[in-house]
Amino acid sequence: MRAETSTLRPNPFSNGGSGETLVEVENLKMHFPITEGVFIQRISGLVKAVDGVSFQIKKGETLGLVGESGCGKTTTGRCILQLEKATAGSIRFDGVDLTALDERSLREMRRNIQVIFQDPYSSLNPRMKVGEIIGEPMYVHGVEPDKKARRARVRDLLTTCGLRPEMDDRYPHEMSGGQRQRVGIARALALNPRFIICDEPVSALDVSIQAQVINLLEDLRDKFDLTYLFIAHDLSVVRHLCHRVAVMYLGKIVELADCDELYDNPQHPYTKALLSAVPVPDPEVERKRPRIIVSGEVPSPINPPSGCVFHPRCPIAVETCRRDIPELREVSPGHWAACPLV
Ligand code: SF4
């Protein structure tokens, strides 16, 4: 056992298949300082929001990043977007270390990396018309300087995202939640990105709309050769879209595998518990299948448990789990789990 999941030799977190790597996150840490004092501030502790996370995403691949709220998945996405300056680790996009770029180069690079936010209600400026919202990034980056051409492209993007072109004249409040999220997707596509971080893009939507938006994201991925990091708080929405899934708990990846493998053969007790909470459509199967309930709440990342951070809630914990930090190990080809008992 060792204290950290560190370097990738050979990369344990790649899917092992062919295809070029587009995104490479290595030993990423994001520790937020907690300060005390009014006049003289001093650091009294650290919130270890992300604590040694590594993964790769191939071109055209969708990696799911799943875990309960507060596990560090959104912070991981924000670090990749350079909205947070990581405490340690590297983030490479197409071989370029984003953490080492100056402001100008980062601005250029940002055209390739876009985000779709969770809440279509608060992520769109209520004072701007839909056409302005989608056209703004093009204007800022000088992608389509001509106003007429920009408007035509905005209307094209609306159609691509399943909306009527004349909706460019509406305000966000005149649209439904699903339509607003489609506007958010059209805005993310405006600069022809190569990589999109989808940060819980369907969790604020009605269940009936969720599948439509997932299907749209799948179509767009195929049509525009996109690569996604798909962040979600439960496993039920990622199966259809993701090629591989990484499960996070308290700032660390505890399991990573191909999507079907993870669903059919979960290894880590936390993944098993998450999966047992996913409803099964067949009521007969649903009634008979065993439930794995993990007790208690996710501990605070300010003072995480010693050893395996999952040990206070783990149904199969043994004495050594309090002491030893489990490392991710390959339990079968391409399937990694951070638990020595599996
Ligand atoms: Fe549970 Fe111990 Fe495995 Fe952690 S290392 S998941 S506490 S059995």
Image: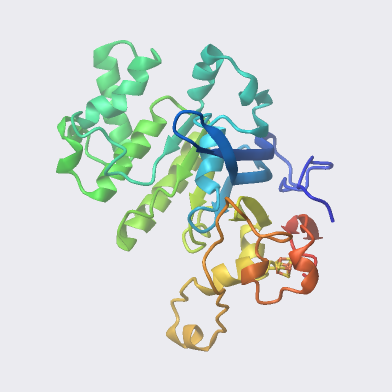
The residue that appears at 25% across and 49% down in the rendered structure is 177
Residue 60: tell me if it is visible. Answer: no
The residue that appears at 55% across and 74% down in the rendered structure is 295
| Residue 104 in the image, given as x and y percentages of width and height | 52, 12
Residue 242: tell me if it is visible. Answer: yes
Quarter of the image with the N terminus in it: bottom right
Q: Looking at the image, which is closer to me, 70 or 283? A: 70
The residue that appears at 74% across and 46% down in the rendered structure is 17
Q: How many discs appear?
A: 0
The residue that appears at 61% across and 50% down in the rendered structure is 251
Rendering quadrant holding ligand 1: bottom right
| Residue 150 in the image, given as x and y percentages of width and height | 29, 19
- Looking at the image, residue 24 sits to the left or right of residue 220; the answer is right
Asked where in the image residue 227 lies, by quadrant, the reply is top right
Q: Looking at the image, which is closer to me, 71 or 342? A: 71
| Residue 36 in the image, given as x and y percentages of width and height | 50, 38
Quarter of the image with the C terminus in it: bottom right
| Residue 238 in the image, given as x and y percentages of width and height | 51, 57
Q: Looking at the image, which is closer to me, 99 or 87? A: 87
Query: Is 175 placed above or below 67 here?
Result: above
Query: Is 200 placed above or below 87 here?
Result: below
